[in-house]
Amino acid sequence: MRIVSIPGALAVLILFSPAASMAQDTDLESMRAAIDELRADYDARIAELERRLAIAEQNASQAVYAAQAVAPEPEQGGGNEAFNPAIGVVFQGRLWGTDGPANESEGFATGETELIMNANVDDKFAAYLTAALAYEDGESELEIEEAWVETTALPAGFGARFGRIASGLGYLNAKHSHQWDFVDLPLPYQAFLDGRYIDNGVQLTWLAPTDVYMELGGEILQGEGDPSGLAASTLFANVGGDVGSSSSWLAGASYLDRDDMASLSVAHFIWKWAPHGNWKDRNFVFQTEYFDYSDTGIDGGWYAQAIYQPFERWRFGARADGLQTDVDDPRRYSLMLDWSNSEFSRLRMQFTQDETGATNRNEWGLQYIHSIGAHGAHTF
Amino acid sequence: MRMLIAVSLLSLVPLSVNAEIRVFACEPEWAALADEIGGDLVETYSATTALQDPHYIQARPSLIAKVRRADLVICSGAQLEIGWLPALLQKANNRKVMPGTDGYMEASRFVLRLDATADLDRAKGDIHPQGNPHIQMNPHNIAAVARALGERLGRINPGNTATYENNLSKFLTRWEEALVRWEDAAMSLKGKQAITHHKSWVYLLNWLGIEESASLEAVPGIPPSAAHLSRLTTQFAGGGADLIIRAPYQHGKASEWLAERTGIPAIVLPLTVGGTSDATNLFTMFDDIIARLQGAMDDA
């Protein structure tokens, strides 16, 4: 404060000192220069004080943040309730009609309603259960669809799964009905595997440490027929990668050897596209599988489908599926449209022209797939 | 001849003498942070880009292959990646990065989260029980995660702890200087009001003292509906909001529709590194955010 009064004192001196003509002008100039210099000095100091004040305020607010920062909680990785399994229920039902001869698939059906539970068992294992709630012949049943334990801590890229497992054969086999893009399975699955092939056994997979996804796997399963069990085995291989930032693909080949049937080989290819990989908005999927069956009478089967989501929540798709027999090539063609209010609910409409029988037949239906509770992450 | 064979055999051996730590980040901001703290010692990969909605990506084979070889997986957490990360971890067969190990890190665990709720009802939309996961939008959070990441890198790669600590302190010095600059520049934004497309901006608005007056989504996760947009037009016809904010991966249609009818400027802000052409790293991302916010205020 003392310093501030100096220019004032100088000013007073200047004003009241005796007039001196020219010499005084130069004095005045030098006084002004001195005042300007002092002013510049004060400005610099005030700026410095302001800067330090800003930093002090900054530190104060950071201290508040530091105090609020929570001690890291133990990782849970899935948001599960402590020790409770993640539980979810998928409500599924459909209303189906056909113009052909009446069959049991017509009318209302809710047989694919599922109860799903999973959790880590300990630091080396996780377990997974899917049970289907069915009401048939006047009785309600809880069927175990899948129930397996998998390893989470094997070294060198290995993984194992044991229990009642959905085989790694093909592509669609491992997908639950609520993940399908059509109400029903393609013809080859119905013809060769009687639906999805789910059996008791062990599965081992190995993922190569490469940039291109390469997975090899095999299973030993109970199978049917052979009384000593272990009557089925599979081998499968999958490769996959990206093309640019918008497309991804998966290709694979698998083989099933089961005592009660001829050997079955399956090749699959899936192509998924979304602009810049922004899946939520617009996307397209192409999927095809080819089945080769080494038996007289029926040689193989196939299907190809394409699903397009032009904007959020709406998708439409087309599928052609068929079998190849010695006698003919039965085929079906299906169209579907579905609307998903959120990722947890879906309403679907499907129309199928069935040319597998002696006469063509049309089928149509509505389906709902609604889930509550925990909803597992879907594989590719 | 033997030399030729030896040389050609050697050329097949992958030249990974450096043994870099492979960091798999779910989002670009954590890959950028790992680059700052790890420098040459880490090789980073981001599963998502700024042009993707990180809630919904495909758990595709290329990502599984990356997780297979990762030494550290760092993600925002708080269930942001719940739709795809668990599928990657399950198929990657990499025990080093499973939840519960040192190789797995959820960034949101190290900061104070906003909007945590025990009222879990999906009728309220896509809510995150552990709080809003988009924590990267407050630079104070970045600093907190940086400290945790530096410590974690030191734990999984103890031979280079000193380097990580050194990089961390250099980063934090630069970050703290930048923080002073940003907070100074953003003083004029305090008390303003914003309409957001989705509730991904809570940490940014909280930091800058901007109030969130409405959301274009009636319920988080459900796309903006005509009915709700009409309601908002009526509500904000006479003012009440200073800008409308959306992320680069969201459609501009809804923001622009509302902007036209209310005169409120609609802007795009980067939600992560790479979201705009100027947001090339964590520093320039916040530079760009502040610049765009001020630009919108000046234009209004």
Image (cartoon, coloured by chain):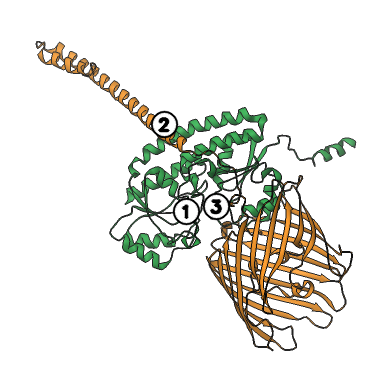
Chain colours: A orange, B green
Answer whether labels 3 and 1 touch (C-beta < 8 Å): no
The residue that disc 3 covers is B80
Q: Chain of mark 1?
A: B
* Residue in view at x 58 percent, y 64 percent: A283
Task: Look at the image and tell me whether residue A176 can be seen.
Answer: no
Q: Relative to the observer, which residue lies in front, A284 or B116?
A: B116
Judge whether A51 appears above or below A235 on screen. above
Answer whether labels 1 and 2 touch (C-beta < 8 Å): no
Q: The residue tagged with tag 1: helix, strand or loop?
A: loop
Amino acid type of the residue that numbered disc 3 sits on in the rendered structure: Leu
Task: Look at the image and tell me whether residue A89 can be seen.
Answer: yes
Q: Residue A346: percent from the left, percent from the top? A: 56, 69
Q: Residue A242: percent from the left, percent from the top? A: 66, 55
Image quarter (top left, top right, bottom left or bottom right) of the C terminus of chain A: bottom right
Residue A59 numbered mark, or none:
2
**Which quadrant holds residue B156?**
top right
Q: Residue A54: percent from the left, percent from the top? A: 36, 31
Amino acid type of the residue that numbered disc 1 sits on in the rendered structure: Ala
* Between discs 3 and 1, the one toward the N terminus: 3
Answer whether labels 3 and 2 touch (C-beta < 8 Å): no
Residue B167 horizontal side relative to residue A267, left or right: left
Cα separation between marks 3 and 2? 31 Å
Image quarter (top left, top right, bottom left or bottom right) of the N terminus of chain A: top left
Residue B69 horizontal side relative to residue A61, left or right: right
The residue that disc 1 covers is B247
Q: Chain of mark 3?
A: B
* Residue in view at x 60 percent, y 51 percent: A78
Amino acid type of the residue that numbered disc 2 sits on in the rendered structure: Asn
Cα separation between marks 1 and 2? 31 Å
